[in-house]
Image (spheres, rainbow, N blue to C red):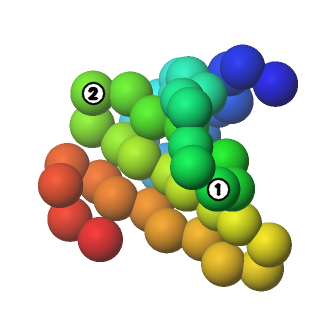
Amino acid sequence: EDEETLSFVYNTNTLYREVSGSGVKYSDDHVLFWSKGDEAMLILNGKK
């Protein structure tokens, strides 16, 4: 998919798929989510 929705307690972000060298990566202006296999990384406002 080209778009995913990420919901937090008080916030919902629509993340858009980006080109990734490996795995899948979705982001918006404040959130980056990357995953490959059984590993994932979430960055919120520049903080892991």
Tell me the residue at 27%/27% (across/down): 29
User: Where is residue 39 drawn, in percent x and y?
Assistant: 66, 78
The picture quadrant where one finds residue 27 is: top left
Above/below status of 25 relative to 40? above
Determine the secondary structure under disc 2. Answer: loop
Classify residue 26 as left or right of residue 42: right
Residue at label 2? Answer: 29
Distance from label 1 to label 2 (Cα)?
Answer: 21 Å
Quadrant position of the N terminus in the picture = top right
Q: Is residue 7 visible?
A: no
Q: Residue furthest left?
A: 46
Classify residue 31 as left or right of residue 20: left
User: Where is residue 9 drawn, in percent x and y?
Assistant: 48, 50
Tell me the residue at 18%/55% (across/down): 46
User: Where is residue 3 drawn, in percent x and y?
Assistant: 68, 21
Tell me the residue at 56%/23% (across/down): 16
The picture quadrant where one finds residue 38 is: bottom right
- The amino acid marked with disc number 2 is Asp
User: In front here: 29 or 23?
Assistant: 23
Classify residue 39 as left or right of residue 30: right
Classify residue 35 as left or right of residue 1: left
User: Where is residue 22 drawn, in percent x and y?
Assistant: 64, 56
Determine the secondary structure under disc 1. Answer: loop
- The amino acid marked with disc number 1 is Ser
Residue at label 1? Answer: 22
Quadrant position of the C terminus in the picture = bottom left
Q: Is residue 23 visible?
A: yes
